Amino acid sequence: MKPKSVGIRDVAKHVGVSTASISRTLNNPESVSPELRMRIDAAIAELGYIPDAAARALSSRRTRTIGAIIPTVDNAMFARGIEALQSYLSLQGYLLLLSTSGYDPETEARQAQNMVSRGIDGLILRGDMHTDALRRLLASQRIPFVNVGVYHPDKPYASVGGNNEAAAYRACRYLIELGHTRIGMVAAISSNNDRATARVSGVRRALAEHGLSLKPEWYIEVPYHLDDARQGARSLLSSPREGWPTAVVCGNDVIAYGVLLEAERHGLDVPSDLSVMGFDDLEWSRHLRPSLTTMHVPTDEVWTRAGEYLVKSLSGRAAALHHEVDVSLVVRESTSRPRPAGGRKAR
């Protein structure tokens, strides 16, 4: 015989409270005391009670589901951010629904429409390059959303991230302070990517302030893949050695890995012959030899803060519309002062 399922009345009886108290705890945990919440959680675990999500959605008009659309899962930074977001939302009693856009705004808009049709309560988007159709959809359905990876305090919708332009400016300025005047960049493809565009702008600004420029032959855009990054570095180093830059700013750490590998293939000593600067500070960056100098982005904080904004907004609590995280320079072994002119060694 099929065992009798445990219902909300069983949990209420076990704890000695009303079913309304159980409902409040499940639908709005912040509305009850921590002590009562712990007792109810313990009773649910002991009895094996599984809340009926469909019934809860009907009564509260909420599914306790947050959607997130990221460009790709083939990126360690996104994987880490989603893990932090999932951990936070789970503790808040929310489910995460994930999709990818492939850096295509039209695909992002379609995925968002699919998520809205499935009843998401809020949405997390990467960057701020969205179609007008997507913005109208979120406005008409009153779906709160937050842009991650960018900080736009001048915009009327939420953002959580660092100032990409200022961070890239700092990265390039550090290389200039070391004495580099021949600086190139292997950037991410800027089309439909406002974070990549801002980083390029930051590098150009730092160079311009010191009377320098980013030569066309020293600027290459590549997808966020190791093979493409290596190909980009290969193109950068295709001219005679005297025509190479002495330092390269990379759009992210994965691109920097490709540059490091290709520099080794060309017999260059990093950092004596070529300094390499990354962006993001992925876990592998400190374990490489040479370890990678990079801009540290607190990825866990960005995605957790985005989740907090939506959870607070959905519960009617005050939430800061914009939150800027600190992107900091981490100096390791892949950068140094340039070798004196004519001093590059051949292997």
Image: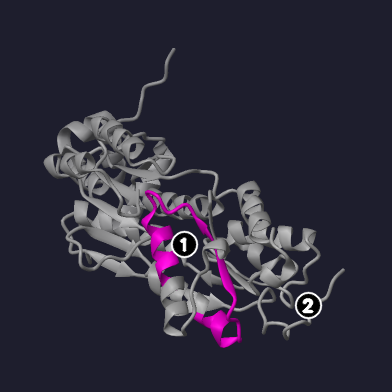
How many numbered marks are there?
Answer: 2
Region of the chain picked out in magenta, as a range: 173-202
The picture places residue 315, in percent across and down from the top left corner, at 19, 53
Give the Cα distance between marks 1 and 2: 37 Å
In what element is the residue under mark 1? helix
Foreground of the two, 214 or 78: 214
Residue under the image location 41 percent in, 35 percent down: 48
Quarter of image, res 335: bottom right
Amino acid type of the residue tagged 1 in the rendering: Thr
**Residue nearest the viewer, comparing 253 with 342:** 342
Percent x, y for residue 38? 35, 54
Residue 200 seen by the camera = yes
Pick whichever, 112 or 316, lies toward us. Answer: 112
Residue 308 highlighted magenta (yes or no): no
Residue 165 falls left or right of residue 23? right
Q: Residues within 10 Å of mark 1 (few under 14, many from 20)?
A: many
Q: Dividing the picture into quarters, in which one does residue 140 lie?
A: top left
**For this view, does 130 lie left or right of residue 234?**
left
**x then y, percent, for residue 300:** 46, 61
**Given this view, does label 1 or label 2 mark the residue nearer the observer?**
2
Which amino acid type is marked by label 2? Answer: Arg
How many residues crowd mark 2 within 10 Å: few (<14), some (14–19), many (20+)? some
The residue at 66%/53% (across/down) is 230
Q: Which residue is mark 1?
A: 299
Q: Residue furthest left?
A: 140
